[in-house]
Image (cartoon, rainbow, N blue to C red):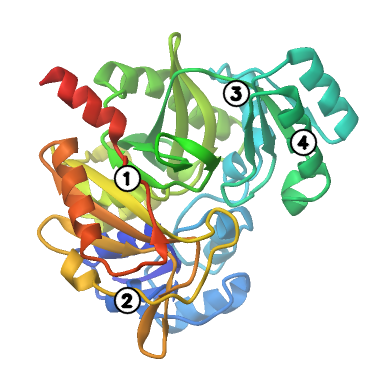
Amino acid sequence: MNVLLLGSGGREHAVAWKMSASPLLTKLYALPGNPGIGRIAEPVKLDVADHSTVAAFCQEKKIDLVVVGPEGPLVAGIADDLRAWGIRVFGPSKAAARLEGSKGFTKDLCAKFNIPTAAYGRFSDLASAKAYVKKTGAPIVIKADGLAAGKGVTIAMTLDEANAALEACFDGAFGAAGAEVVVEEYLTGEEASFFCLCDGATALPFGTAQDHKRVGDGDTGPNTGGMGAYSPAPVMTPEMTERTMREIIEPTMRGMANLGAPFAGILFAGLMITDHGPKLIEYNTRFGDPECQVLMMRLKDDLLVLLNAAVDGQLAHMSIRWSDETALTVVMAARGYPGTPEKGSVIRGLDEAEGEGVQVFHAGTAINGGALVANGGRVLNVTALGKTVGEAQAKAYAAIEQIDWPQGFYRHDIGWRAVEREKAGA
């Protein structure tokens, strides 16, 4: 098969790495890719927003499958436009991608189909939103409705923080994404990431992970796109997984079909495991980042076979095998992230860092004058597999010691909850 992968981050590098092991793969192209992906795929320089040009490329290169990595092209309808040209695509339609593209749409879906989630209000003007916040009280969660690159959510512990977050949204801090705001009840519990591979009718569980959103050790500082993750998530017991499928995923699949927008692709449920069971925080309609990196390390089956089954509506006949080991990834970020990251610093030592059960995925890198340099906020994902969380954690941090990048920083406690659980159970 000739495959075109859309995207340039760590998630896409992990997907490319896993697909490259498939005997089905003839040639892998990446639009635009990154220096890490470029070692296993041919980079393509096209405008991903120009769907007809992408379609023409697919026809010229006889592309058998397009795999869409990031959410932006999905919300913009690239899957629909390529399918109209007769091109097979792994990724949801524009109508189904609203599950990520509009938080308000998802909350309304939950209300209509009785899916457990936080109480909420939707607002398109500042005064009404502030009145709701005043009436509800803090802590409270403020979310820009649209895509905001993982930065449109504020967990406000005081009314002042909540009002400041609302003002930022309506003043244009997140562009069009903040023109409407969702205000949510603050949930307490433990967060988990739950994935399903979907073909429009069947949803097949596709692993669990736990992400670390805060920039600093001990879960301190501002939220980021994710500073590290590990898989599986201990909180997602078989019983909790079964409840999540029954109470959240299956009603969502039925609800989307009912709305004329059946969901096919990866459905990523951000969950809060509360005293009353799982509640949906939000949906994403693609592999998580950095959760994808740990899932790909643990996946024993051929990813390309699974993606083809999803595209062809054959998931009812499939099962997925996972390694019993734990995978853990640590994000190395550029100084300044999650604000304005410093770009251009040279990175060395990646070959020394990689080894048995250790992969370094490129997330925000570039080549400048023959040298590998930082070219984003989250730059590298140092990922390791171990028999225990503690072993995977130790391997990942040992690999980081081999990387020569003084301008990078990272959290030193990825996986801390699971490591504490392990020690308690020892």
| Residue at x 83% of width, y 47% of height | 171
Structural distance between the alpha carbons of marks 1 and 4: 31 Å
Residue 41 shows which numbered tag?
2
Q: Which residue is mark 3?
A: 110
For marks 4 and 2, give the one nearer the viewer: 4
Amino acid on which disc 2 is placed: Ala
Ranked by sequence position, the earlier of labels 2 and 3 is 2
Is the residue under label 2 in contact with that under label 1 (CB below 8 Å)?
no
Ranked by sequence position, the earlier of labels 1 and 3 is 3
Q: Is residue 18 above or below residue 96?
A: below
Residue 412 shows which numbered tag?
1
The local secondary structure at tag 2 comes to: loop
Label 2 CA crowd tier, 10 Å (few <14, some 14–19, many 20+)? many
Across and down, in percent, residue 269 comes to 46, 34
Is the residue under label 3 in contact with that under label 2 (CB below 8 Å)?
no
Residue 164 shows which numbered tag?
4
